[in-house]
Image (cartoon, rainbow, N blue to C red):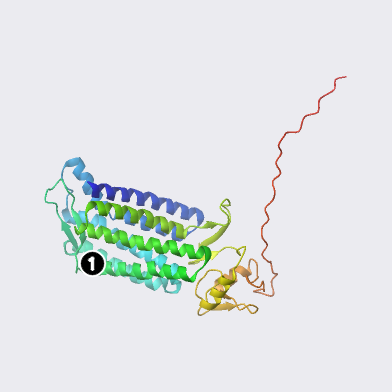
Amino acid sequence: MLYGITETFILIYCFIFGILLIYKSRVTNAKLLGYIGFVGIGTGLIGLGACIDFFTILLTGKNMDNTYSLRGLLGFIWAPILVGILLVYIMAELLMPKLKWPLVTLSTIGAVIVELFLFLDPMSSLIYNYPSSPGEDLIYVSYKIGSPAFFFMIIYFLFLVIFCAFGFLYKSILSTGVIKKKFQFLSFGAFLAVGAGIVNNLYNLEIINSITFSIFSISCNFLGYYFFYLGLKEEPEEPNLRPKKEVKVAESIFRLSKKPAQITEEEVSISKEKQICLVCKGNVVKIIYLCPECRTFYCIKCVDALTNQENACWVCSAPFDESKPVKPFKKEEKKEEIKISEKPKKKSKIKK
């Protein structure tokens, strides 16, 4: 009962949260936020087989028909495509944009191989733990240790831990300010997503009990995708101002849409020492722009964007393109609102 309720809650939560993220990504034009929405939906659908089995028992008093191993396929076919491929795409976009398509191609090939094993021979890829009392307990399914499908899913897990969780954490150490916070949120989300997958398989292998599973599974799914949302959503410059954005997810990386009100000496020194772009905090190892006045590092994409806006270095205000006018950054002054406390009195008419 507890396992069925937990899987049902996670399915509903992930589906609703995923739809909201997809909608918000369309409104804000943040495509990576939409991909996380699909990942959330895929995570919820992993428990689809358990939910159908649970409601079948409640309504009929029997377990669902397991013809062609439908119980296992309904849950496990979603993970390689909606979770594996999309998480690899998001990781590559933010950490290794130059290797994005090779990584996504390898991930897609691995996902297709897993799907083929699941469909062609599910009994050899999955373990089915049938209840001792049919109609009273659920059918628990997990990957069979040593099977090809299990091997490829282990690779996915290791990839998510090493490159996503620790990769985002390492990127946060190199970054500062809002960008640092964004990568920290993504790292926390990746760790919790991996934790949810581990806990789910441990329960299906009857290693942990129902209470432990429910607490950890709900916590990991709820907090994990909320951290992904915090990491990829756009941030306003001020809490009460919605139209202007301080951080946008565009062209594969986080970008500041305009110069911050203050740039610290620490940010400039980190940019020079680590050779990272002052604007997007990305590595600029091969193609770089070095300010001729202050020797600050910029990537070419950020220089092109700033040339069309301010055309001035964020540190020394030297022009990027001398043939174009320089528009130095000016702090926006808050306009005082004049409040009229009383309405003007109407002039009384004098009767003659």
Residue 44 picture location, percent across and down: 32, 53
Q: Residue furthest right?
A: 352
Would residue 68 be found to the left or right of residue 349 on screen? left
Q: Can residue 76 be seen in the rendering of this structure?
A: no
Residue 255 picture location, percent across and down: 53, 65
Q: Residue at x 43, y 71 (%)?
A: 170
Would residue 268 be found to the left or right of residue 163 on screen? right
Pick whichever, 128 or 162, lies toward us: 162
Q: Secondary structure at mark 1?
A: helix
**Mark count:** 1
Above-or-below relation of 225 to 175:
above
Pick whichever, 262 or 302, lies toward us: 262
Q: Which residue is mark 1?
A: 150
The amino acid at mark 1 is: Phe
Q: Residue furthest left?
A: 132
Residue 164 picture location, percent across and down: 38, 67
Q: Residue at x 56, y 75 (%)?
A: 269
Quarter of the rendering containing residue 43: bottom left
Above-or-below relation of 299 to 115:
below
Pick whichever, 279 or 270, lies toward us: 270
Q: Can residue 141 be seen in the rendering of this structure?
A: yes
**Quarter of the picture holding the C terminus:** top right
Residue 254 picture location, percent across and down: 50, 65
Mark 1 crowdedness (10 Å alpha carbons): few <14, some 14-19, many ≥20: some
Q: Residue at x 30, y 55 (%)?
A: 216
